Image: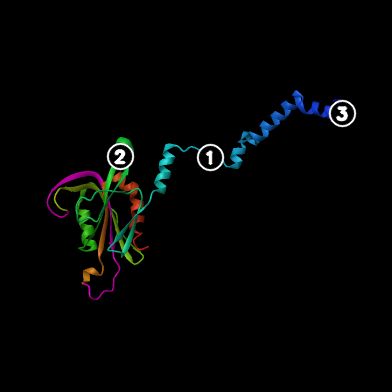
Amino acid sequence: MIRPDPIPEVENMKTALFSPATLLSRTTQMLSTSCCWILAGGAILTPLAVQGAPPAAVSGDEATAAEQSTEPTATIQIFGDAGTLVVPADFKKAKKANNIIDHEFSASAGEGEDVKTARLTMMPASGGVDANIDRWIGQFSGTSKKVKPTQETESGKWNVYVVEISGDFAERMGGGPFAGGRFVKRSDYAMIGAILVEPDQDSPGQPEFAHHRQYFVKMIGPAPVIAAHGKAFKKMVHSVGK
């Protein structure tokens, strides 16, 4: 077979395309365009970033905060479906101390060995708003005792009374909620309590006490814990009429 003579133009093209200098230049160009672009100011932008890079790693503290923010919130029904309390995720469900209490939660503040915990209880009660607030105030003593003015507001048709007290708290150990047991003094304690008064149900057949039933929500514990969760507590009790 007779091989045709090479065409000069083709040979020159092959030489230009596959010369070492050309290959090196093309390789450098490919790497610079497919690997990364260096922008003004030294910032580096990769094609992966343009197309959507995988999520960046999250530090432990950031991950914990994200988990807390997405944690489901509990809802508490009051007197059947008369009202609903939206409980923040920072208030953790706890075992009830007795059967008079409807629901019990705990709230904490601090880190490591410095963690302190407060007790949050919910229960129906009676006896009048002023009388119960006076009783709560009487549970505190000491030269550091402080009582803020009672805040009276409305949430929907519910009346909400909030009281804040601090000082030395007389905690009852054992016995029932109103009698028995012994008292232990807890220094530097505080309470934020709320009395939720149900709207008039307009039920002529029901006794008077059934028209404006009362529901107590109290958080008692070390003062720093109450201070840390006071805002969340107030938001929770004012969710009752929404």
Q: Is residue 179 above or below residue 3?
A: below
Q: Residue furthest front?
A: 1
In percent of width and height, residue 154 lies at 34, 64
| Image quarter of the C terminus | bottom left
CA separation, marks 3 and 2? 87 Å
- Is 199 inside the magenta-drawn segment? yes
Q: Residue furthest top?
A: 20
Q: Is residue 234 above or below residue 209?
A: above
The residue indicated by pointer 1 is: 54
| Amino acid carrying mark 1 in the image | Pro
The disc at residue 7 is 3
| Amino acid carrying mark 3 in the image | Ile
Give 138 or 229, whichever is nearer the viewer.
Answer: 229
Residue 236 falls left or right of residue 3:
left
Q: Earlier in the sequence, mark 3 or mark 2?
A: 3
Question: Counting other residues with Cα less than 10 Å from the Cα at mark 2, is it few (<14), some (14-19), or many (20 or more)?
Answer: few
Q: Secondary structure at mark 3?
A: loop
Q: Earlier in the sequence, mark 1 or mark 2?
A: 1
Q: Residue furthest left?
A: 180
The residue indicated by pointer 2 is: 115
Can residue 165 be seen here? The reply is no
- Is 144 inside the magenta-drawn segment? no
In percent of width and height, residue 42 lies at 62, 33
**What's drawn in magenta, residue-wise?**
177-206
In percent of width and height, residue 189 lies at 25, 46
Closer to us: mark 3 or mark 2? 3
Q: Is the residue under label 2 in contact with that under label 3 (CB below 8 Å)?
A: no
